[in-house]
Structure formats: structure tokens, C-alpha cells
Amino acid sequence: MNIPSNSLPDTVLDRLLKTAPQLEIWWDSSPLVYPSWVEKLLASTPPEQHDLLRQQLRLLFDPQAPQNTRFTGVTTNPPLTLAAIKDDPQRWAAWVAAYHRQHPAHDAQQVFWALYKEVVRLGAETYYPLYVASRGAYGHLSAQVNPHDFFDIGAMVQQALELRSLSGNIAIKIPGTQQGMQAIR
């Protein structure tokens, strides 16, 4: 991981990384929401703090250069994906409309699953440069199978295979039920 040198003060994360250089620090949401999250955070702070805060937040995650930032991975799941969709409703409404034109027979569950996979794919794509730069040590996106299927081994396995096929840097989360353990095996 390439941590840029700068004149900003050491953060708690910087000091933690100095004690454990292989430490992974993950963003607990889709990376697609990070830019708007930053803007909302800045809007709640005094203007004179914006420049410094923006620089510090860019050190945590820079979508243009994820290999140079502190977040080394990202996790997502259906509720976090919903937050990403709500973060940019026009974009995703257009995506759903285009998907529906191509797949008019798909029901709401099929459309949701396709939408979820697209958000996962785009998030994984964002982190893929870090995955490549670190030779697979960092840059993973964790994607969860549908938590409503926690007793259905076949559904969890199928969903895991579909999610994993989207990108080489996707790790799969499966519920810790007995059936989930069987699906992992």
C-alpha cells in the first residue's frame, strides 16, 4: 500500500498503520456513496475547515487513486446498497428503466438482484486498482448473499457464484447459519 507523504498531521489511523503496516482498514458502505458523504459532511462543518477536512477525507479514500488511500477494502450488503441507490436516485431509476426494457418479464426480486449486482460490480471496479497494485492483498469488496435466503443452501451458493463472477476482488459474505456453513463448504 502506498501511503502518500504530506504535511497533514498524523491521524489515529496513520499511527495505527505505523504499528501494524499490514492492517486493513475498510469503509463500511459502497464506495459509490463516498463522494456525496464527503460533501454532506463538509456542509455540516464551518467553511474555514473545509480545505483541511477535504484533504484528510481524501487520504481515507480517493476514488481516483484508491491505491494511495487508507481504506484498503470495502464492505457492502443489500441495505448498504439501498443507501447507494438512494444516494443517486436518478441514476438508478434510469438503470432500472433500461434493465426493464431489456428484461420485461423479470419480477421485482430479479430486478433488485440485478441492481444489487451492478452496484457491487461498480464498487469492486473502484477498488480493483488497489487489488492489482497490492497483488491481491488489499482492494477487496465484500458482497453479501441475500440474507433472506439464510436457510437455502442452493440459493446462497448460486448467489455467491454470481457475485464472485463479477470481479476478481470480490469476497463473499454468507450468513453463519448451519445452512450457510454448508454453503461455504
Image (cartoon, helix red, strand yellow):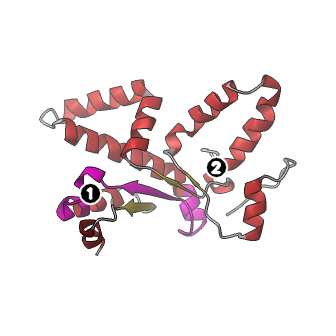
Residue 49 screen position, x and y as percent: 80, 30
**Amino acid at pointer 2:** Ala
Under circle 2, the secondary element is loop
Q: Work out whether residue 145 can be spotted.
A: yes
Residue extent of the magenta highlight: 129-156
Q: Quadrant of the N terminus?
A: bottom right
Q: Quadrant of the C terminus?
A: bottom left
**Nearest to the observer: residue 108 or residue 135:** 108
Corner quadrant of residue 16 = bottom right
**Nearest to the observer: residue 175 or residue 142:** 175
Query: Is residue 40 in the magenta section?
Result: no
Corner quadrant of residue 163 = bottom left
Q: Residues within 10 Å of mark 1 (few under 14, many from 20)?
A: many
**Amino acid at pointer 1:** Gln
Q: Which residue is mark 2?
A: 65
Residue 17 screen position, x and y as percent: 73, 64
Q: Nearer the viewer, mark 2 or mark 1?
A: 1
Residue 59 screen position, x and y as percent: 71, 48
Q: Which residue is mark 1?
A: 159
Query: Is residue 139 in the magenta section?
Result: yes
Q: Residue furthest bottom?
A: 185
Q: Residue furthest left?
A: 105
**Residue at horizontal 60 percent and vertical 67 percent from the top:** 134
Q: Residues within 10 Å of mark 2 (few under 14, many from 20)?
A: some
Task: Tell me which numbered mark, 2 or 1, is placed earlier along the sequence.
Answer: 2
- Is residue 99 placed above or below 21 in the rendered structure? above
**Nearest to the observer: residue 25 or residue 139:** 25
Residue 179 screen position, x and y as percent: 23, 67
| Rendered image: mark on residue 110 | none
